[in-house]
Amino acid sequence: MDLDDLNIFEKYSTGTFALVLGMAIIGTITYVIYVLAPLYGPDRSIFLLSFLVIILGVFIPFSFFIEMLFDDIPDVVGKFVAGILFAGIVWTSYHAATSEDVVGNDMVLYMVLPALFSILTALIAVRGVLIPTLEERSFMVDWDEGEEGIIDDEGDEEHPLDEDDDEELFPEEIDDSW
């Protein structure tokens, strides 16, 4: 097995990831409404900690791929920030487990799943949709600002349109005054 076989972001199109992203967003919102929203009550600390985990999870893929999004920021800085955000998720989960007595299935339900949903949804958004869209846009800008003239595939010579080629002109544009 080659590492290129594991890179699903090169195998599938941006449209496919946009479709999956839409389903992931709907799934995450449904999870928040039906699992986390009932926690909002008099003792809402678990609800707030779960939302903190979701917010931290959303920013991990953005910081992990920060070099692909912004050219001025080095990759090491983005990976460092992603590590800090992941440590924040672990710390929040530990705090929920020790001070709020969230253990076992509740820990998975209120801390681990929101983190996974938010990280995977943001990963699909950043690496599957946003980065390819920005790359296509930058390609189109470079193409529009390119050299004038037609470039031949076999060489770098420019081939301006022949002035003697009257076949491409409309009949009223042909100058017969010569």
Image: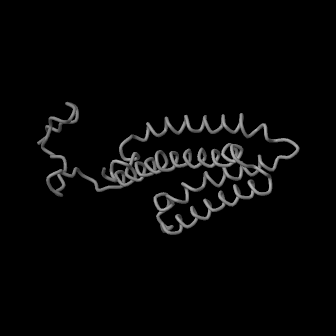
Q: Residue at x 51, y 60 (%)?
A: 66
Image quarter where the C terminus lies is top left
* Number of numbered markers: 0
Position of residue 100 in the picture relative to residue 154 (left or right): right
Q: Residue furthest right?
A: 42
- Residue 24, horizontal then vertical, whole percent: 56, 38
Q: Residue furthest top?
A: 171
Q: Nearer the viewer, residue 71 or 90?
A: 90
- Residue 81, horizontal then vertical, whole percent: 58, 65
Q: Residue at x 66, y 37 (%)?
A: 31
Position of residue 160 in the picture relative to residue 15 (left or right): left
Q: How is the image coloured?
A: one colour
Q: Residue furthest front?
A: 104
To which quarter of the image does residue 173 belong? top left
Q: Residue at x 22, y 32 (%)?
A: 170
Q: Nearer the viewer, residue 144 or 78?
A: 78
* 55 lies above or below 71: above
Position of residue 68 in the picture relative to residue 94 (left or right): left
- Residue 146, horizontal then vertical, whole percent: 32, 55
- Residue 29, horizontal then vertical, whole percent: 65, 37
